[in-house]
Image (cartoon, rainbow, N blue to C red):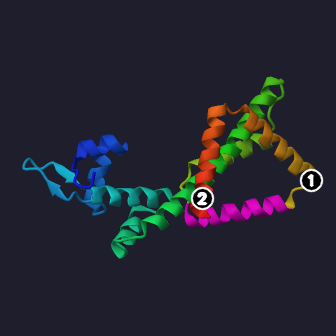
Amino acid sequence: MQGKVWRIGELAGETGITVRTLHHYDQLGLLSPSSRTSGGHRCYTSRDVQRLHRIIALQSCGLSLDEIKTALDADAHRDLAGLLARQLEVVSERMRQAVALRMRLAGILDALGQMAEPSVTEILRLIEETITMNQPLTPQRFAELKEERTRHLREMSAGEFAELSQKREQTWAALSQEEQARLLEQLREAFAAVG
C-alpha cells in the first residue's frame, strides 16, 4: 500500500471522513494532497494517510484544529508509537465511561421494570455521564478523570464498593459472550500497549 494513491473520494470512502472535511483540512493547511490529477482532483499518498491519522488522533485527544496544526508543524515526524499509546489511553478511558454509562442505564431500566421511578439524582448522573461520554477527552480532562476515579474509590464505604462490584457483575453477565470476548481482548491490548 506504500505506493498507492487515493483520490479524495476514495480516501473519504475508506476512512469515513467526508470530502468536505478533507477540503477543509486542505484549506487550513492541515492536510494538503501530495498531487493532483490533470483534471485537478486531489490525490493522497500513504504519507498523507499517516498525517490524516495524526490529525484524527490528536482531535480525539481534544485538541483544536489550530492546536493540531501547530503540533504537526512543530514536529513533522512525531513519534507514531507515542501518539498511538496516547490514543489508546483515550479509547480505554472512553470504554470505562461507556461501561459506567451502560451500568447506569441498565440500573435505571431495571428500576423501571420494577415500576420504580428513577430518582432525580440518578437522572442527573445519567445526564452528566452522557455528556462526558460525548465530550473530547483532553489530556487535562483525562488526568482529572483519573484523579476523580482514584479519589472516589478511596472515599467509598465498604457497602458502596460491594454495591458497585455487584452492578459490575450484573453488567458483565448481561453482555453476550461475543461482547465479553471483544471487551477482554480490547483490555488485553490496552494493557499490553501501556505495559
Q: Position of residue 192 (x, y in %)?
A: 60, 58
For the point 86% across and 61% down, the residue is 155
For the point 31% across and 62% down, the residue is 30
**Quick check: 77 above or below 96?**
below
Specify the farthest residue to the bottom: 74
Q: Position of residue 42 (x, y in %)?
A: 18, 51
Q: Quadrant of the C terminus?
A: bottom right
The amino acid at mark 1 is: Ala
Q: Which residues are magenta?
A: 138-154
Q: Which mark is residue 105?
A: none
* The magenta stretch spans residue 52: no
> Residue 130 falls in which quadrant of the image?
top right
Q: Is residue 66 left or right of residue 3?
A: right
> Residue 67 falls in which quadrant of the image?
bottom left
CB under 8 Å between discs 1 and 2: no
How many numbered marks does the figure carry? 2
Q: Position of residue 74 (x, y in %)?
A: 36, 76
Question: Does residue 157 appear in the picture of this structure?
Answer: yes
Tag 2: Cα neighbours inside 10 Å, few (<14), some, or many (≥20)?
few
The residue carrying mark 1 is: 158
In this rendered view, identify the residue nearer to me: 168 or 143.
Answer: 168
Q: Main secondary structure of the magenta part?
A: helix
**Quick check: 54 above or below 37?**
below
**Quick check: 69 above or below 182?**
below
Specify the farthest residue to the left: 38
Tag 1: Cα neighbours inside 10 Å, few (<14), some, or many (≥20)?
few
Q: Is residue 174 left or right of residue 57?
A: right
SS at circle 2: helix
The amino acid at mark 2 is: Ala
Q: Which mark is residue 192?
A: 2
* The magenta stretch spans residue 148: yes
Q: Is residue 169 left or right of residue 29?
A: right
